[in-house]
Image (cartoon, helix red, strand yellow):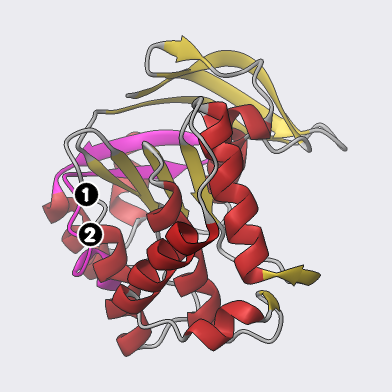
Amino acid sequence: MLEIKNLHARIAEDGTEIIRGLNLTVKKGEVAAIMGPNGSGKSTLSYVLAGREDYEVTEGDILYEGESILNMDTAERAAAGIFLAFQYPVEIPGVATMQFLKVAMNEQRKAHGEEELTTPEFIRRVREAAGELKIDMDMLKRPLNVGFSGGEKKRAEILQMSLLQPRLCVLDETDSGLDIDALKIVSDGVNALRSPDRAIVVITHYQRLLEHIVPDTVHVLYRGQVIKSGDKALALELETNGYANIIEEAA
């Protein structure tokens, strides 16, 4: 589903190269974890996948469903089924969460040639998904993410993912700022989306998230490259021994 070939990417403003020849393949039905020390390029990779404008791809390619997405803007990538859950979701004053969800869902449906949801059907779907994530409907009447706790923001992100049903989900350190209870709720929401037709990329520093969202593969990112890949046992090794030995082996 996702194939990244010799990817090089830099910050557009100052030309600093962050991704330096990254290769990665994620298959349909796979949950792939990406781990690595601070500054290794994990969040940059998520931004580049989503098409964030302040990053430039200077070499290589990103294939999604066999087609390059480099010439697609963020909206086109979203319509194609690529979803990014942010590490730090932004607050958007003046935009009611329910209105945001309705517009997002109907824009997605329009892109697929489907009719807009009726208001009763939209509310039914939101109530059902919110209930599974233990989200109070009153919270969804507030402006998007404004005044939300860290756990509420992350649950709102997973709610969006549940409603939009993307085919490629990229989770950028979704466990940041979550207590144990919120982590379990968010993880259950992600696990509910596991499907033979969907791929999930989980970016994290910590094994604790991977105890709840058990990955099929684990990739270690360092200085903009994947330096080692393995199964879930690799995450346990990193938790016990850190990154030093793996970085030394790759040098």
Q: Horizontal and vertical percent for residue 21? A: 51, 22
Quadrant of the rendered structure where residue 159 is?
Answer: bottom left
What residue is disc 2 on?
Answer: 191
**Residue 229 colored magenta?**
yes
Depth order, front residue of 38/114: 114
Amino acid found under the numbered disc labelled 2:
Asn
The vertical placement of 176 against 47, above or below, is: below
Q: Would residue 207 be seen by someone viewing this image from the given angle?
A: no
How packed mark 1 is, by other alpha carbons closer than 10 Å (few <14, some 14-19, many 20 or more), is some
What residue is disc 1 on?
Answer: 194
Assign a secondary structure to mark 2.
helix
At 86% across and 37% down in the image, what residue appears?
14
Mark 2 vs 1: CB contact within 8 A: yes
At 54% across and 38% down in the image, what residue appears?
108
How packed mark 2 is, by other alpha carbons closer than 10 Å (few <14, some 14-19, many 20 or more), is some
At 21% across and 38% down in the image, what residue appears?
30
Quadrant of the rendered structure where residue 23 is?
Answer: top left
Cα–Cα span, label 2 and label 1: 5 Å
Q: Horizontal and vertical percent for residue 46? A: 54, 43
Q: Would residue 186 be seen by someone viewing this image from the given angle?
A: yes
Amino acid found under the numbered disc labelled 1:
Arg
Q: Which residues are magenta?
A: 208-231
Q: Where, quadrant-wise, is the C terminus in this rendering?
A: top left
**With 246 as the anchor, is 13 left or right in this view?**
right
Q: Where, quadrant-wise, is the N terminus in this rendering?
A: top left
At 49% across and 44% down in the image, what residue appears?
83
Depth order, front residue of 126/199: 126
Quadrant of the rendered structure where residue 52 is?
Answer: top right
Q: Horizontal and vertical percent for residue 238? A: 26, 60
**With 157 as the anchor, is 27 left or right in this view?**
left
**With 14 as the anchor, is 67 left or right in this view?**
left
